[in-house]
Amino acid sequence: MNIKYKLGNTLHQISFCRKREKNNISKEIEKLRSDRNILLIYDDKINQNITKQVFEDLKLSGCKIFTLKSEGDKKNKNEKFLFKIIDLLIRRKFTKKSIIISLGGGVVGDVSALASSLYLRGLIYFNIPSTMTSIVDSCIGGKTAINYKGITNSVGTYYHPKNVFILEDIFQNIPNREFDAGIAEIIKCGVIDNEKILNFLKMNKEKIYKRDYKTVANLCKQTLQSKIKFFKTDVYENDKRLFLNFGHTFAHAIEMATEVNLKKDFIRHGEAVGLGMLAEIYYENRSKGKIFNLVKDLLKTYNLPIKLDFTKIKINKIKLLNDIYKNLFLDKKKIDKYPRYISIKKIGSPKVKEIKDFDFINDTILKVLF
């Protein structure tokens, strides 16, 4: 099962790879005019059998393979990791015809893709996503970034993977919390584009929980096709691609604030996006209406938080509220003095608006998040 799409004159492909299928990656490498040098950047938390499977596949290509082990924590999405990759590329004399392959979640993928775009102004890049959020969201679209000076994704480029490989074994090995976190990005695409996705989530809960491959792959395919529709004619986010940021204005503010105040990985990106969607719906509609409750119920169904949970931690809630408020104004989508968010009054009909009612921000944070 493949998805193919064009950006300009370049063909890109997403391949869903079954266990019984062999040599998926090496076959694609053989089609390229590469210099036969590969750097595999992998998250050391991934099941070792999966890493070994990928490595064995790459060996069949006859290429020279270098490896770089990494840790996919948010704290490593920084310039140190970026230049560690670039230093290795220089040391091993990689060229524009060399290949970087990332095997990991959003952090490993984002930084590997950024390095791929910067080194010699671009070499060949493949992505093998290993978390649900990266499978349904960050593996395509071309956004690359590191976090810098405490600001999420403040330094980055647009650079698209030539190929994405989604492995059946990875679906089975994603930890439950990471799997659930990815569902938030699926809900997002359902709300801004395709109500069929929301109905699929409602009707197939048991099969999705059991990681039934055909069901989960179908769900991911629908979500990726929805995302492609938004970015393929608007790569640089000047128009419709902005709709894919639904929930993210508040989500990034939440992520930055909790990271500073708790000094640990308190919330997953997908969990923050779920809360961000609720906050943006509430801010737009000034109440918890039908769409708010629809999203809330789906988040609950898939074990995602509907409020920030402080039951097991001590935190200064006033400071956290103020930091979330402040971080909204660091949002990279902001053009003037007002942060932008995605307004939803009807499923499938998103609009870009600005947050101008500063007083109602605090009401939104208190009523929705706390």
Image: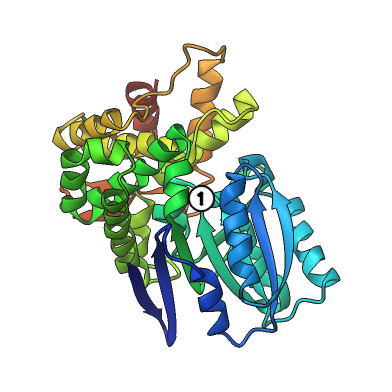
Residue beneath disc 1: 130
Amino acid type indicated by mark 1: Ser
The residue at 33%/34% (across/down) is 279
Confirm whether residue 154 shows in the render: no
The quarter holding residue 260 reads top right
In the displayed structure, 337 sits above or below 160; it is above
In the displayed structure, 214 sits above or below 300; it is below
Please state if 188 lies on the left or on the right of 115 as rendered: left
Q: Position of residue 92 (x, y in %)?
A: 82, 72
The residue at 69%/80% (across/down) is 36
Q: Position of residue 187 (x, y in %)?
A: 28, 45
In the displayed structure, 265 sits above or below 221; it is above
The residue at 38%/25% (across/down) is 369
Please state if 3 lies on the left or on the right of 86 as rendered: left
Quarter of the image where the C terminus is located: top left
Q: Nearer the viewer, residue 243 or 183?
A: 183
Confirm whether residue 329 shows in the render: yes
